[in-house]
Image: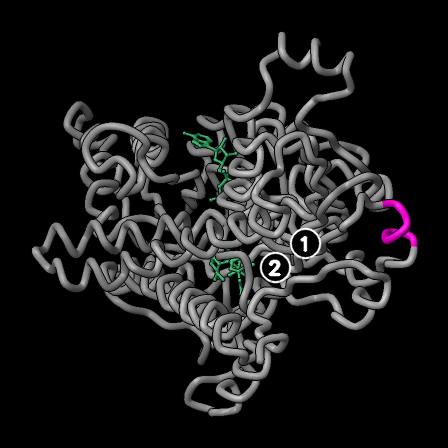
Amino acid sequence: MNNLKIKKICCVGAGYVGGPTMAVIADHCSDLKVNVVDRNEERIRNWNHKDISNLPIYEKGLDQIIKRTRNKNLFFSTKIEDAIAEADMIFISVNTPIKNKGLGAGQTSDLRWVESCARKISLHAKGHTIVVEKSTLPVRTAKTIKDILFASNDDLNEKNKKTFSVLSNPEFLAEGTAILNLEKPDRILIGGEDKKSIEALVEIYLRWVPRKKIITTNLWSSELSKLTSNAFLAQRISSINSISAICESSGADVYEVANAIGKDTRIGSQFLNPGPGFGGSCFKKDILNLVYLCNYFGLSEVASFWESIVRINQWQQDRIYKKIVESLFGNISGKKIAILGFAFKAGTNDTRESPAISISKNLLLEGAKLAIHDPKVQPSQIQNDLSDYLLTQEDNNKDLKNNKSNLMFFTDIYQAAEGAHALIIITEWDNYKKIDWNIISKNMSKPSWVFDTRGILAKDKINKYGINFWQLGDGSGKN
Ligand code: UDX
Ligand code: ADP
């Protein structure tokens, strides 16, 4: 192993992490060939779609980068084995959701995709390959990956033996601002044991990231830093959300409180927006992984500290749903309710762990008819997320005749609100800040309610049209 100059990169997994990350690397490293592979044919077809608006992932600025790099030095394909065989460096960016059955179900990540990916690399890689963990993984997964990678060597003769080094290079991008985060990262974290491999990856980032922002650590510190970083961010949200409830009861206003505490430089002003609870693929999963790890090491007090962050998050979603039902006289059966926003936050089409899912499910259970609007999320995705709670096909056919289907999709906000008893803002999309409440007030059922779980609407603008208004964390009506 003399030369670790990287010429060809492969990324397994063309999802929210793999796609944008590789696009930015390709954009800054025109001399590198970057192959992004995925076993999902439809996803790859969409990444290769002529019409750039059909990319499988919506991220501001991503389409322009894809235009510049695609089929020049960035390639999307399903030829996983070929891409692995020719790569000097392979990023693992596959999904790692929480296990839904078996040992550790509901607590730790399901590593079946990582394992199958490591097995493929082990079989098809040639010579020396640097394997980089990009997906968020439980601490010590690098050990599992190493064990799998080296296993296939047992069957090879000395001449054909392969070598690997494993690095951890967690991604800190946030959806909606992925390109900005990738272009101007707060830091790049690389954990590993082999200095030459670390330096090879550092060299790639140095094309656009200053060296002082690149941190190198041991493998386990890198893996744990990613979990800890997400746990701290989620903790801030649960903290301010818990305060939002005290504000409503005590007469305080959570935005005034957040502003006041955020001025303390030790606290800082970011990530203090109260809301319906954090969503996204990472926060809950990473905290649960941390909790699992704590329990594994017998640190039950530490485990329960972090577990409470997830509990409060669910409680926040539940209390919003209860507030809606109570305000509508304890009965929402057959009532139309408009849900504005289904993505877990603005700027993305991702619905994973979106608070909209649990709030909608509870409303459907109470018999409500939901009219859903989201500027980026496809109705098929929402249908999938709520599938267990929808009327059956048989019910649906029957009820459609009676115009009683319990889920409707709208591309027009005003139509979604027509005849609705309540309108709930769940995602903070900019369009919702510009709604004409005069029109809405005329079309809704009376008494009409607006629930703003994101604090994006002005109370006086809505109240003047005779609409009842509830805003999360606003106790100012209390005397
Ligand atoms: C997060 C981390 O920010 C990122 O570093 C990591 O790589 C992946 O996980 P992401 O899940 O994409 O990114 O979005 P983020 O902006 O962190 O928001 C997560 C959730 O918290 C969203 O549901 C968002 O609405 C919510 N949130 C965020 C709040 O409710 N209030 C805030 O102040 C910030
Ligand atoms: P993330 O948010 O972590 O990027 P996604 O679910 O958006 O997660 O993307 C992960 C991608 O990894 C999916 O498109 C999935 O098809 C792909 N994938 C999972 N396992 C494998 C595998 N063994 N080989 C190739 N692709 C895989």
Q: Mark 2–mark 1 contact, CB under 8 Å?
A: yes
**Tag 2: residue type?**
Thr
Q: What residue is pinned by disc 1?
A: 425
Location of residue 252 in the rendering, given as x and y in whole percent from the top left corner = 54, 80
- Residue in the picture at 58% in, 55% down: 175
- Residue in the picture at 34% in, 53% down: 286
Q: Quadrant of residue 434?
A: bottom right
Tag shown at residue 453: 2
- Residue in the picture at 22% in, 42% down: 146
Q: Which sits earlier in the primary sequence, circle 2 or circle 1?
A: 1
Q: Quadrant of residue 357?
A: top right
Task: Tell which residue pokes out farthest to the left in this image.
Answer: 298
Location of residue 267 in the rendering, given as x and y in whole percent from the top left corner = 44, 85
Circle 2 — which element? loop
- Span shown in magenta: 439-443
**Could you classify mark 1 by the number of other residues whose Cα lies within 10 Å: few (under 14), some (14-19), or many (20 or more)?**
many
Main SS type for the magenta part? helix
**Cβ of mark 1 under 8 A from ligand 1:** no
